[in-house]
Amino acid sequence: FKQHVSLLLDPAESRLTSRMKLQLAEAKEEFDSLSRRSLSIEKELKNYVQDNPLCQHLMTLPGIGVLNATALFSSIGNGSQFGKPRDLSVWLGVTPKQYASGEKSFNGGITKRGNRYLRKQLIHGARTLLHRTKGKTDKLSVWIQQIVERRGKNKAVVAIANRLARLAWILLQRNEDYRATTV
């Protein structure tokens, strides 16, 4: 990308007018500035995680990286405001809506309550985790493969996000790293 833009900005290049080159040069400067700022923020987050044992515990969970760990910790701290793992999942909105009439009861889509950013980040982490489970034999990977077979990928991603939230709460409460167990 940068090389292509540099070629377009070359004075000998005639495909762009001088005005377009000026606008492209300004856009390139802005892009470079934002890239530097993004790298700086990423470095700050990594330093924060190094000094925070709870974030380090969260990062041992598959699908949870620097962004998810810091977002989770900044939103819920050690999770003590939630009585059990399901309470965190409900607060995040990654649990199914329940409908009931008479004796019939069924689950609908997710409730979408709580912190939208955190829910989105957990779903992104879950989607990444989904693609990394092929052929693995740990309990979480086997469970993911089974849920994909039963429900399909999109519903599985939300179920994985729900499971990640619950596991994150457990890690925060126990103050320990995630340990994958094989089946």
Image (cartoon, rainbow, N blue to C red):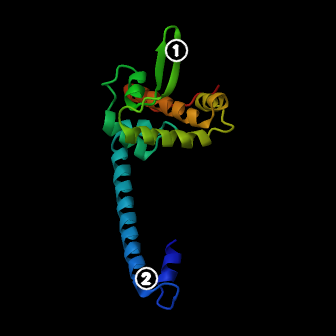
Asked if residue 44 lies left or right of residue 140, the reply is left
Residue at x 41% of width, y 73% of height? 28
**Number of residues whose C-alpha sits closer than 10 Å to that of mark 2, classed few (under 14), some (14–19) or many (20 or more):** some
Q: In the rendered picture of this protein, how many numbered marks are placed on residues?
A: 2
The amino acid marked with disc number 1 is Ser
Residue at x 30% of width, y 25% of height? 81
60 versus 104 height, above or below: below
Identify the mark at residue 93; answer none if there is no mark: none
Q: Which residue is mark 2?
A: 21
Q: Residue at the bottom extreme?
A: 12
Choose top left, top right, bottom left or bottom right for residue 113: top left
Disc 1 to disc 2, C-alpha distance: 62 Å
Choose top left, top right, bottom left or bottom right for residue 133: top right
Residue at x 58% of width, y 33% of height? 156
The amino acid marked with disc number 2 is Lys
Quarter of the figure that contains the C terminus: top right
Secondary structure, mark 2, is: helix
Identify the mark at residue 105; answer none if there is no mark: 1
Residue at x 31% of width, y 25% of height? 80
Residue 112: % across, % down: 41, 33
State the residue in front, 138 or 108: 108
**Number of residues whose C-alpha sits closer than 10 Å to that of mark 1, classed few (under 14), some (14–19) or many (20 or more):** few
Asked if residue 125 lies left or right of residue 175, the reply is right
